[in-house]
Image (cartoon, rainbow, N blue to C red):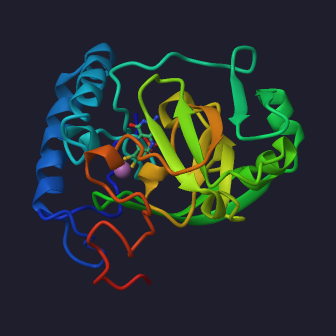
Amino acid sequence: MNPEQPPQAPDDDGRDTRGTPVGRRVFLGTLALGALGVAAAPTLQRGLESFLAGASDKDPTGLTGLLPNGGGFRYYSVTSSVPKKNADTYRLTVDGLVDRPTTYTLAALKALPQTRMVQDVQCVTGWRVPDTPFEGVRLSRLLDAAGVRSSAGAVRFTCFDGAYSESLTLDQARRADVLVALRMRDEDIGHAHGGPARLYVAPMYFYKSAKWLSGITVTEDVEPGYWEERGYDIDAWVGRSNGRDDEPTS
Ligand SMILES: Nc1nc2c(c(=O)[nH]1)N[C@H]1C(S)=C(S)[C@@H](COP(=O)(O)O)O[C@H]1N2
Ligand SMILES: [Mo]
């Protein structure tokens, strides 16, 4: 594990503190990590990680965010464990209101043209990771290949953690900055960050970027995703949603 602290952090009301001193919550987190680093063996740390991951479905802004994950990322999962998938076992299905339902292997996804983008990652709870490369297949390409029917208006995403879901309108899903990402920070996406494939919705808060992506279903209407059923905005534009409308977007 990399004990590096996130460059950006939420303060106590969860607002971005770019350019201001580190907030109290992060200070406490640093103390907790320091103690952890000295006292805990790797196995204990892993146990704590799954415990904290379990706690996250009660408090998305909570303890999970204290774990060091390298490069400023926090590790989030709403489930306490997630099965591992590799190049042999991973499948991504595209179905619903399409003419040609399709199942992709990882190799099939890798064989398609890849798009690389570098933007800031922004979690709605306040932490931000600047200039993060993501690379993968444009979602629009998979939708076009499947042949979206005229009755369709939205896309729903499901995950092999068995719990998380997300959704976009069809217009949002067709944006050029929405990817089925296979690489993050110029490495294959590891299990902790939703590998082998996760959704990447660049212009929206990071909860839209569903990890462990296994299903893309074209639907008539948007169905609220996991966090959206728990009060977060469905249209999660960074700086223009979730009560941040008053903040500068730059
Ligand atoms: N399947 C799944 N995807 C998910 C989540 C999750 O708990 N499960 N958390 C979301 C949230 S709130 C954030 S901030 C990012 C965190 O991604 P990371 O763990 O790679 O930092 O994943 C998003 N996608
Ligand atoms: Mo998040």
Rendered residue at 29%/26% (across/down):
49
The answer, for residue 13, to whether it is visible in the render is yes
**199 vs 202: above or below:** above
Residue 219: quarter of image: top right
In percent of width and height, residue 143 lies at 77, 48
In percent of width and height, residue 4 lies at 36, 49
Q: What quarter of the picture does the N terminus occupy?
A: top left
In percent of width and height, residue 221 lies at 54, 51
**Direction from residue 230 to residue 154 in the image, left or right:** right
**130 vs 74: above or below:** below
The answer, for residue 209, to whether it is visible in the render is no
Q: Nearer the viewer, residue 153 or 180?
A: 153
Q: Nearer the viewer, residue 13 or 228?
A: 228
**Direction from residue 14 to residue 184 in the image, left or right:** right
In percent of width and height, residue 168 lies at 55, 54
Rendered residue at 37%/33% (across/down):
77
Q: What quarter of the picture does the C terminus occupy?
A: bottom left
Rendered residue at 71%/33% (across/down):
95
**Direction from residue 213 to residue 192 in the image, left or right:** left
**145 vs 92: above or below:** below
**Direction from residue 222 to residue 229 in the image, left or right:** left
Toward the front, the furthest residue is 151
In this rendering, the count of numbered labels is: 0
Rendered residue at 57%/32% (across/down):
190
